[in-house]
Image: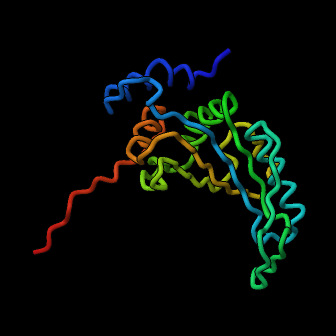
C-alpha cells in the first residue's frame, strides 16, 4: 500500500514540474529527501520531565523513536552545561516521511486557528524549508485531554532542489498552503 502523497508526486507533480521548469529527465525533478522534526525543552521548570514529555509527543506524532539532543557547550547565563540533554529530533525518510507530510499538509495545518497559509520566505537559499509549529495539538494523534504542556517544534523539509524557486514549486504542487506575499509597491506623494 502506497501513501497517497507519494502517488500524487509520481503521477501529477513530476510531469507538472518537468513542464514548468523544462527538465528533460524525470530524475532532474526535485524531490523531498527527508523531513527533520526538532524540539527543545528550553528553560522548563523540570527539564527531565519536559524532555520525557517532548520525546513521547514526538514519537506519537512521527511514529518513530526520537534521538535526544545535547548541548554543545556551556552557557552560564542560560544555566546550561556541556552535554546536557536539551531536546529531541526525528529524521523521517521514505514511507514515514510521506505519511507525515500528508498529515501535516492535509490535516494539521488546516486545524490552526485563523490559518491563512505559511510564509514563502522560510527557505534557506539551498532549497530547504523550515516551518515552526507552536503547538502539538494540531496533530490528530494527540489526545487533547492528555496534554501536560505545550511543545513547539520545527519541521525542516530537505529537498534535492537547487534553488528556492524550484523547492517552492515542488512544495506548492504537493499541496503546501503558501500565502501570497506579492504586495503592490506603495507610492509616496
| Residue lying at the far top of the rendered structure | 1
**Which of 46/76 is in front?**
76
Please indicate whether residue 4 sits to the left or right of residue 86 in the image: left
Q: Is residue 78 above or below residue 187?
A: below
Quarter location, residue 50: bottom right
Please indicate whether residue 63 sits to the left or right of residue 125 in the image: right
Quarter location, residue 65: top right
Question: What colouring method underlies this structural image?
Answer: rainbow
Q: Is residue 49 above or below residue 120?
A: below
| Residue lying at the far bottom of the rendered structure | 77
**Which of 135/51 is in front?**
51
- Say which residue appears at 89% left-offset and 61% top-offset: 49
Q: Is residue 6 above or below residue 64?
A: above
Q: Is residue 95 above or below residue 161?
A: above
- Say which residue appears at 84% left-offset and 64% top-offset: 85
For the N terminus, the image quarter is top right
Rendered location of residue 125, percent (x, y): 45, 55
Rendered location of residue 117, percent (x, y): 45, 47
- Say which residue appears at 74% left-offset and 41% top-offset: 61
Amino acid at each position: 500500500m502506497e501513501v497517497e502523497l507519494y502517488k500524487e508526486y509520481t503521477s501529477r507533480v513530476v510531469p507538472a514540474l518537468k513542464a514548468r521548469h523544462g527538465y528533460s529527465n524525470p530524475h532532474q525533478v526535485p524531490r523531498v529527501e527527508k523531513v527533520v522534526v526538532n524540539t527543545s525543552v528550553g528553560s522548563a521548570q523540570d527539564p527531565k520531565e519536559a524532555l520525557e514529555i517532548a520525546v513521547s509527543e514526538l514519537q506519537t506524532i512521527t511514529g518513530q523513536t526520537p534521538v535526544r539532543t545535547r548541548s554543545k557547550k556551556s552557557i552560564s547565563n542560560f544555566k546550561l552545561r556541556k552535554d546536557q540533554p536539551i531536546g529531541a529530533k526525528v529524521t523521517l525518510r521514505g514511507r514515514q516521511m510521506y505519511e507525515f507530510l500528508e498529515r501535516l499538509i492535509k490535516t494539521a495545518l488546516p486545524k490552526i486557528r485563523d490559518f491563512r497559509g505559511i510564509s514563502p520566505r522560510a527557505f534557506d537559499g539551498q532549497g530547504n524549508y523550515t516551518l515552526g509549529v507552536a503547538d502539538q495539538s494540531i496533530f490528530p494523534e494527540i489526545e487533547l485531554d492528555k496534554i501536560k504542556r505545550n511543545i513547539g517544534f520545527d519541521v525542516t523539509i530537505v529537498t534535492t532542489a537547487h534553488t528556492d524557486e524550484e523547492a517552492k514549486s515542488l512544495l506548492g504542487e504537493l499541496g503546501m498552503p503558501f500565502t501570497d506575499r506579492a504586495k503592490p509597491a506603495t507610492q509616496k506623494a
